[in-house]
Each structure stands twice: as structure tokens, then as C-alpha cells.
Image: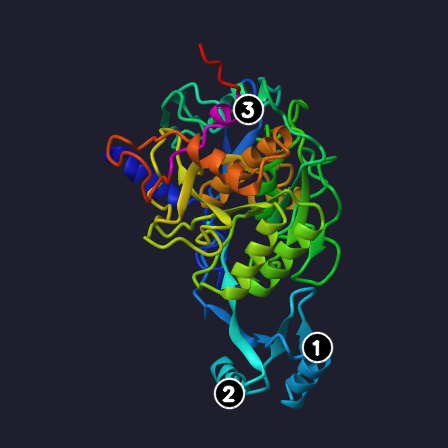
Amino acid sequence: MSMPARRFARAAAAVLVILWASLGSGDANVSSRVRRPVRVSSLRAPRRLHVQQAMVRARRRGYATDRVLVRFRPEVDDAYAEGLLRSYGFPAVRRLSGIGIYSVRTAPRVTVAETLALLRRNPDIALARPDYRVRLAEIPNDPYFLNYQYALRNNGGILDISPDNRPQMTAGADIKATAAWDVAKGDADTIIAILDTGVDMTHPDLVGKIVSTGRDFANDDNDATDDVWHGTHVAGVAAANTNNGVGIAGVAWNCRILPVKVTDATGEGFYSWIIEGIRWAADNGADVINLSLGGDADDPFLKEACQYAHDKGVVIVASAGNDGLQRVLFPAAYDDYVLAAAASDYNDDIADFSNFGPEIDVAAPGVLVLGPVPQFYADAAFGPGAPPYVFASGTSSAAPHVSGMAALIRSAKPDLSVDDLMKVIRYTADDVNRAELPGRDDHAGYGRINMARALVPTILR
């Protein structure tokens, strides 16, 4: 990667992280820092678009400080298990739906470490763990497609975001979407579950694409409306309404979205919410699950949830993380069950912020990716009437490109096993960093995804 490209990639890393830099404090004295609105110089898209910068949050403890997760041995029945937990005097005991894991509220003035030590001494308990946090890392006529969505078709030239943000692009540094769309645009019966901050179901680029109001595990209700912005952006990249004369094009034209909210209004979530969300999505028709979030801790309960969905034939895609470190976040690091997505840019360079490691499967565009956001967010951040779209950077934006591609393959080849579908995505990728690291490597995996190679039939002569 050239030094100018590296400098810009480092700057772009500050634009947007997986949810936040650490999914930490929601204190009132911590606020987002956003760039002033700028006008995009485009006749095709005369309205203003904006670059979303990171919300800066103070780092907090990496797990919930008021509860733990508990599993009993197989021979222990549910009634006895719940009674035993209540005999300890815990203020609240809740069984996670259909999983056999209990969420236990710690007693007042008793730490998580003390609670775990107490529970682990009981021979009926197989496993007691903290509840870890996660952090948020055919040519359509959509007006922003030609000038701004380099990820789908990159003709080179300047990505003209603002007067002081005009990076040079390399022609062909894209996922070859237009050639693939001539073959497959997806099926409405193919469902992409977005496990995130929720989805704005009234956004003009998402109306009609939502399967149901979904499930909100943060607030324990059946309304997965986005109260942040992140999940709406991710959903739009994967499967926005396309060729509708509005906004952007989604990767999977005709596939639909199942919203699953697994963070609260601060953008903060826990493994228990993710675990329930994965299983709920798998049980409610998801063909693909997108997780543009992750945590630092390896956890057997989270891994089992991924295995559960995988064994039901669901393709899971997760973002690798935005720390620029040799550490792939979980659940992306569960190699047998999840495709881990790194972030590339408009020159097919791997972004400096993209985490790396042997678990990386593929890369996809994740630098300055345009996507929808709720109107309330655009109004608050950029002024009343601002277009509800922002550019965002992070492996969060890379993952939904992979998820959209997985949905198109599932639509075109419904009999393909989940393992074979994952292999198609891996083995058809372009080895974009082969000059420095030929073959599979820990930064790009098998390479930047190539939709055309995966979907367009090859004619042997």
C-alpha cells in the first residue's frame, strides 16, 4: 500500500468504527463529533451527503457488571435449576429462550467475579460466564449509484465527497456487482437478518423490504426500530431498494431484511442479546445473518449459537474489527461457522484499521461506504431536511457486502450447503494484495469478494 493510501486509510479509520470504538460509556458528557454538512458536486445527486465520524466513548468494563450467564449439567431439570438459582437469593433469574442458559442478576454489592466463584463451586453447574459486551467494526437508476457507490462498480476517477475529501479511485477496485446482477438479483424469499441497532423500517430505501417488525432483545419487545443509525446503514448496504429511483443500490436487489435489535439506544449490547438474536433469526426464516459488531472474548455460549444457526443452513457474516490489530473479534473468529470480513478501499488496499489474523476469510469495501440512516439522525446531526444518507467506514460496512452476496448465491443456488456456499465466497475472491502477500493471507483472507466470479456461469471453450 502506498504511503498516501496508508495515510488516508488511517484517517478513514476514524470515520466510523464497528459500532463505537469500544461500546463504552453512554455518559451525557460524551458526545459524537461530526463534520459539517458539505455539498456533493454532482448533477446526478444534487443534495448534500455527509461523512459520519466516530462517536468517542470512554472505555468501560468488558462485561455486564450486574449479571452472569449460567448453564447446568444435562441431567439437571429446569425446575430444579431455577429453584437452585433462586435459593442463592439472586434478585432476578431469566432463562434465555430455547437455549438452556440462565441470565442471573448478581446480588447487591456482590461482584461478577465473586458470583462466578460461588456458582462454579456447585457441581450441578456446568459453566458460569460473564455476559460480555460487544462493540459496534444491470445498472440501477438509484441516483447515488453512479457517482458514490464505488464498491459496486468502480470506474476510477475522484470520489467527490467534499472539497477537502476527494480521494482518487482505481478502476475495477469493486465487487463486480453489475455483471452479477445480469444473472441474479435475488429472491424475495431469501432473508437477511440484520443483528444490530435495529432498522428504520420507514426509510424510503427500505420500505417494502422488511419481513416483519422483528425482535428487540435489548428492550424485550417485538419492535426492532433503529434508535441509533448503524443498523439502518448496514441493512441498506446489504439490500436497499434498488432500481427505484431513490438513494442507493443494495447488493441483494430483491432479498428482504429481518431486523433484530441487539443493542440499546447507546449502541451498547451484550453477548446474551446476540446469542438470543442469532437463534431467533435462525428459527424465523433467516438465510443469512449479518453481525456488524463483535466482542473481544471467546465465549462457548456465543459459539454454540453460531453453530446452531450454521447447522440450520444459515450463512453468518461478521465484521473483523477496527482496531488495526492482529485480533479478529468474536463471533467473526469462529472459523467453522462464520465468514470474517475485513475492509478494503476504493483502490483495493486493505484498510489500516481492519483487524487481521488467520480467521479472516475475505475482504469487502469498507472505506467511505454510502448508506441510509434514519431521518431523525440526519436531522439531528446535520440539520433539518438533510438527506438521510452518510458515508461510513469500518468492517461494519464491509460485512453487509458479503451478506448481500451470500443472499444472492442462496437465491440462485438454493440447494447449496452452507459450507459449500461459504467456500464459493472464499474461493472466487480476487487476491488483491498478491504482490505483497500472494495467496490466502491474514489481512485479506482469500481476497476481495467478486460477485461476478461467484454467480456468472463460466463457459469452457
Quadrant of residue 216 in the image? bottom right
State the residue position of label 3.
Answer: 145
State the residue position of label 2.
Answer: 121
The residue type indicated by label 1 comes to: Asp
Please identify, in this view, whether the residue under mark 3 or under mark 1 is nearer the observer.
1
Q: Where 173 falls versus 328 (above or below)?
A: above
The residue type indicated by label 3 comes to: Phe
Please report the residue visible at 43 percent of the width from the left and 18 percent of the height from the top.
155
Quadrant of residue 346 in the image? top left
Q: Quadrant of the C terminus?
A: top left
Mark before the other along the chain sequence, 3 or 1: 1
- SS type, badge 2: loop
Mark before the other along the chain sequence, 2 or 3: 2
Magenta stretch encompasses residue 229:
no
State the residue position of label 1.
Answer: 78
- SS type, badge 1: helix
Please report the residue visible at 35 percent of the width from the left and 42 percent of the height from the top.
11
Local packing at callout 2 (Cα closer than 10 Å; few below 14, some 14-19, many 20+) is few
The location of residue 385, given as percent across then percent down, is 64, 37
Mark before the other along the chain sequence, 2 or 1: 1
Local packing at callout 3 (Cα closer than 10 Å; few below 14, some 14-19, many 20+) is many
The residue type indicated by label 2 comes to: Arg
Q: Where 117 falls versus 356 (above or below)?
A: below
Viewer-proximal residue among 249 and 165: 249
Q: Which residues are magenta?
A: 446-456
- SS type, badge 3: helix
The location of residue 235, given as percent across then percent down, is 61, 41
The location of residue 397, given as percent across then percent down, is 49, 41
| Distance of label 3 from label 1 (alpha carbons) | 54 Å
